[in-house]
């Protein structure tokens, strides 16, 4: 058997089975390293990011909770998010609001947060939010509207990239993945089954007095004009 000296044939060595496997491993480790650095930078930037306070023109008295605040610094509200930041009052992962007594919260606001829970978790979450609200309390939700996403997709010549992030989430950190989809009838049915009543659509300017800079009044450009992406529904306990 003739044994080749691969030191004389670097290209042969490069494409040998063993070397190819090693290169793939090194390539994957290289990508993993940069992905890890990107994630660390993302969390670090958010953690130390100073967010300007936002003072809604319309605000009711009582305890108000902003679940999944992200970069929106609502004044007069308890800002809760999965990530730490100077404007976040409480860091939590499951949003069970165990820190609050039942029947103690006047308003709960969630903008493009509910879809980050599985359809199995959503019903439990909504039931728990109903329990935490005081009688007459308001749950105000904004979620990606699946019917509108279809309109946006079709109006952009079936370009799926035009709805990718709204449908599936930004996927740039652990909790930024979407697990559920909603339209008006499906979300209304869930809210009613969890005890909410007097369901109605709401508008950001009408309810808060101004745009909040979140997804609640965001529109997507299409070849047929701008199309709102969000389904905004509120219910009363």
Image (spheres, rainbow, N blue to C red):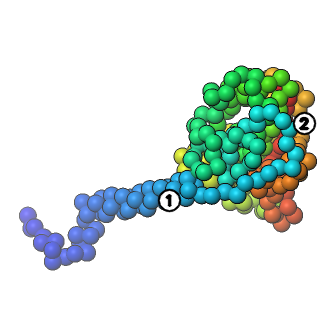
Which residue occupies 86% across, 47% down? 208
Instruction: Quarter of the image for the C terminus: give it.
Output: top right
Near-viewer residue (80 or 9): 80
Left or right of 210 on screen, residue 131: left
Instruction: Estimate the x, y position of residue 209 in percent, counting from the top left.
Output: 88, 50
Can residue 156 be seen in this snapshot? yes
CA neighbours of label 2 inside 10 A, class few (<14), some (14 to 19), many (20+):
few
Image depth: mark 1 or mark 2 in front: 1
Which image quarter: residue 48? bottom right
Which image quarter: residue 8? bottom left
Which residue occupies 62% across, 53% down? 170
Instruction: Estimate the x, y position of residue 62 in percent, counting from the top left.
Output: 80, 33
Q: Is residue 126 above or below residue 50?
A: above
Near-viewer residue (97 or 59): 59
Q: Is residue 16 above or below residue 144?
A: below
Q: Which residue is mark 2?
A: 200
Which residue occupies 19% across, 76% down? 9
Q: Which residue is mark 1?
A: 41
């Amino acid at each position: 058997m003739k044994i080749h000296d691969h030191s004389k044939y670097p290209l042969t060595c490069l494409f040998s089975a063993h070397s190819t496997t090693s290169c793939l491993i090194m390539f994957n480790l290289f990508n993993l390293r940069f992905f890890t650095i990107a994630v660390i930078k993302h969390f670090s930037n958010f953690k130390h990011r100073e967010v300007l306070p936002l003072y809604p023109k319309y605000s009711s008295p009582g305890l108000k909770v902003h679940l999944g605040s992200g970069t929106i610094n609502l004044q007069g509200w308890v800002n809760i998010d999965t990530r730490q930041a100077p404007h976040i009052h409480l860091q939590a992962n499951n949003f069970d609001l165990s820190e609050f007594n039942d029947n103690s919260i006047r308003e709960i606001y969630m903008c493009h947060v509910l879809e980050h829970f599985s359809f199995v978790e959503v019903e439990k979450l909504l039931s728990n939010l109903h329990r935490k609200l005081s009688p007459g309390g308001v749950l105000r939700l904004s979620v990606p509207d699946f019917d509108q996403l279809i309109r946006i997709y079709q109006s952009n010549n079936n370009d799926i990239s035009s709805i990718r992030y709204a449908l599936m989430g930004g996927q740039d950190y652990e909790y930024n993945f979407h697990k559920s989809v909603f339209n008006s009838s499906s979300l209304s049915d869930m809210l009613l089954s969890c005890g909410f009543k007097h369901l109605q659509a709401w508008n950001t300017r009408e309810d808060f007095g101004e745009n909040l800079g979140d997804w609640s009044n965001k529109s997507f450009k299409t070849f047929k004009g701008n199309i709102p992406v969000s389904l905004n529904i509120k219910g009363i306990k």
